[in-house]
Image (cartoon, rainbow, N blue to C red):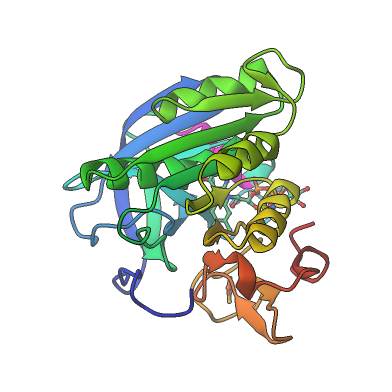
Amino acid sequence: MSSDDHRVQAPFGAREVTVATAEQIGPYRVFGCSDELGPRPTAGQFYMLASSERWGAGSDERPYLPRAISVLAAGDADLSFMIEAVGPGTERLEQLVEGDGLRLLGPLGNGFSAPADGARAILCGGGIGIAPLAMMQQQLLSAGREVTALLGFRDGAHAAGARLIAGAQVATDDGSVGHQGLVTELLLAELDRDSNAVIYSCGPPQMLDAVRAIGVARGAATQLALEAPMACGFGACYGCVVKAADGSYRRSCVDGPVISADELAPDWLEVGGVK
Ligand SMILES: Cc1cc2nc3c(=O)[nH]c(=O)nc-3n(C[C@H](O)[C@H](O)[C@H](O)COP(=O)(O)OP(=O)(O)OC[C@H]3O[C@@H](n4cnc5c(N)ncnc54)[C@H](O)[C@@H]3O)c2cc1C
Ligand code: FES
């Protein structure tokens, strides 16, 4: 997806906003803010976020770069984000409470594009990757489109995140909620039922790669929202490259993060730094 069709351009520079809402959903932290100066994002776009205070400024802390975070929902001026703490940046973002300052840059990257007329959308994701899918579901339902949602989580605690997507079928690794097994098993069953469906996916790298392989093998239009580690978020550092099927490289921050499955090299995971 290398065209600019789905890209809302970010204004130059980071903006300072205030956290207005914060709630815990299972292991995930969801917080909202009002961003009156920024353009409205589309599903699949992301922001570079940093807390205004205590962002690695102490003498025993490393200076942090902002972290790439998908937009979960957007209203007329509101934005919300969903965090799972995996390291110092997300641990700090997870601690944000109402009234705290947040620095954001965005919206960045290319979002998802709508399915062809009449085609059903299948949202297939897992873990923190449900954020862009939740926003895509809202966009599709508002446009009167048919949507099926399939979500995979490692256990029942993480499956609490499924409440962010209406009517989702859930799979868990341990079988504590929904189907015991992989979300890709649910995806294969849906494609058996409707081979014209368009797949939208975001999730852990191995899951995303399995969805890529299924989409290519079945000839299904498949849009993947990559979460390759990013440093700048706007095309300057080449820290986010992934290998394309033609042997060239794509910067996932500006050529993605949404990329067609058939555009990626089969070994993209080994060279994209997303292992
Ligand atoms: C476009 C995009 C959207 C994202 N959206 C969200 C979101 O909505 N919510 C959210 O919580 N996170 C999201 N992420 C992931 C988040 O930006 C990274 O995990 C980030 O590096 C976390 O920073 P940290 O300091 O907490 O952990 P780090 O110190 O950066 O990393 C902690 C551990 O996670 C591993 N890791 C880091 N990044 C990735 C990755 N992308 N894939 C696999 N392993 C990784 C590292 O190797 C390390 O072991 C997104 C990333 C991208 C590129
Ligand atoms: S993150 Fe710097 S070029 Fe993509």
Image quarter of the C terminus:
bottom right
Can residue 95 be seen from the camera position used here?
yes
- Point 54% across, 51% down: residue: 195
Vertical placement of 158 versus 110: above or below? above
**Magenta segment: does it hold 90?**
yes
Q: Is residue 98 above or below residue 52?
A: above
Q: Is residue 272 left or right of residue 168?
A: right
- Can residue 91 be seen in the rendering of this structure? no
Q: Position of residue 266 (x, y in %)?
A: 77, 69
Residue at coordinates 68% horizontally, 40% vertically from top-left?
184
In-front residue for pair 140/53: 140
**Residue 146, position as x, y percentages in the image:** 34, 41
**Outermost residue, top side:** 176
Q: Residue at x 55, y 50 (%)?
A: 201
Residue 161 as seen in the image, left or right of residue 165: right
Who's the residue at 53% across and 56% down the image? 68
How far from the left and from the top, in percent, is residue 160?
54, 20
Decide which of 231, 57 is in the foreground and name it.
231
**Magenta-colored segment: predominant secondary structure:** helix
Start-end of magenta stretch: 89-96
